[in-house]
Image: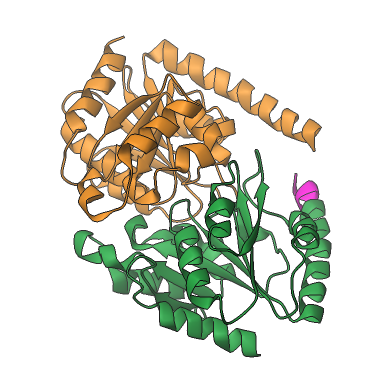
Chain colours: A orange, B green
Amino acid sequence: MVQIEQDILGKNDQYAAANRSWFRAKGILALNLVSSPGSGKTSLLTRSIQDLKGRYPLAVIEGDQQTSHDADRIRATGVSALQINTGKGCHLDAHMVGHAIESLGLAEKSLLFIENVGNLVCPAAFDLGEAHKVAILSVTEGEDKPLKYPDMFHAADLMILNKIDLLPYLDFDLALCLDYARRVNPGIEILQVSARSGEGLDAWYGWLAARMAS
Amino acid sequence: MVQIEQDILGKNDQYAAANRSWFRAKGILALNLVSSPGSGKTSLLTRSIQDLKGRYPLAVIEGDQQTSHDADRIRATGVSALQINTGKGCHLDAHMVGHAIESLGLAEKSLLFIENVGNLVCPAAFDLGEAHKVAILSVTEGEDKPLKYPDMFHAADLMILNKIDLLPYLDFDLALCLDYARRVNPGIEILQVSARSGEGLDAWYGWLAARMAS
């Protein structure tokens, strides 16, 4: 099984490298959004798109095992979105994303959000050619998730801690969660936001602006 | 890849069948608890164990990518628990569970909870020899999860909707969630509980009692 796994990952890495050069050539910032199911990735995206629509050309690739709900939610904002259904699969791969970017017709200097299948294990191993993996963790999931799913939090450059408007109603140890995240990834950046209340979103938009400018 | 997948699943099914006959011979009720990360499986388990300790011999197998936090939480209740770390793996398999039951030294007529890796995709395909898959969904995850991860909710006999104490603070359409669950699995039983407040747990204990008696 080890050999087969290496072959699959090796093949994926070739497609990822091709996607990455294409993104670079077009000046496109591609972000791979990863999280548990229900962390609020799509809500964060729809809110971000409403707030950023004037600033950059935007596009979205949506990964889900089934349904086109998320792509429908994105398209309702007026931004183009392409849904990939993975069927039995637990993650997007670079080949799927390569096909998706052909269909999307992305403008130069776009900001491309790739919303992966909700899963804290499988997407960690599959490079899609993105500039950064962004891990979204909601405070309702408990503070121990970075330790229990270390590969994902190790692979991410940014952790967005979402749903902080619910903190008053939860037993969630915020300091411990940040400590756990930094234990598995000392260099990880962390932003605390609520996609519902809007709290903390300016810092997220600032993070994006810095990377769009570079 | 299809052939390899069939070989793995075929091999797993043989181990699962062996586990299942062993459970039957010993009168053990084995339940496979599946959910997203952070749905509250371990909190539900520790609370259930506190409340059921006098009634049945209990034991727990814990699956996590990393850490023994969950087994430690279970052992703190005085019940024996065995932790399986899956490393890169996104689910338990029947072979791992077969080894675990050898080590656990289960009493006849025990109630065995197998807490799978937090993941709504991969564990759906792997039979562990359990009597029932029980899917836990927390209301913080959004009502669309049964449609987006249909294999899991199709494979489960019971869905436990957890964290209902948080409903007043969320935009969660309860009726729609139940409708979605029944669309992918018309026969699914559904219980609404809060492991924190204790609301609805009597119905869960009743569900267990009916199956322990049969």
The residue sitting at 83% across, 68% down in the picture is B18
| Residue B101, horizontal then vertical, whole percent | 76, 62
Q: Is residue B214 left or right of residue A70?
A: right
Q: Quadrant of the C terminus of chain A?
A: top left
* Front position in the image: A59 or B155: B155
Residues rendered magenta in the picture = B1-5
Tell me which residue sits at (73%, 68%) in the image.
B129
In the rendered view, would you say B135 is above or below A146?
below
Residue B97 spot, x, y in % from top left: 74, 59
Name the residue located 27 percent from the left edge and 62 percent from the top edge. B166
- Tell which of A48 and A138 is nearer to you: A138
Magenta: predominant secondary structure element? helix
| Residue A134 visible from this viewpoint | no
> Residue B157's quadrant in the figure?
bottom right
Is A27 placed above or below B48 here? above
Q: Is residue B2 within the magenta segment?
A: yes
- In the image, residue B71 sits, relative to residue A198, either above or below, namely below
Q: Is residue B141 left or right of residue A146?
A: left
Which one is nearer the viewer's eye here, A105 or A34? A34
- The percent position of residue A51, horizontal first and vertical second, equals 16, 33
Residue B87 image point, x, y percent: 66, 39
Answer whether residue B19 is magenta in the image: no
Q: Residue at x 55, y 59 (%)?
A: B74
User: How many numbered markers are drawn?
Assistant: 0
Lateral position of residue A172 relative to residue A67, left or right: left
Q: Is residue A105 visible?
A: yes
For the N terminus of chain A, which image quadrant?
top right
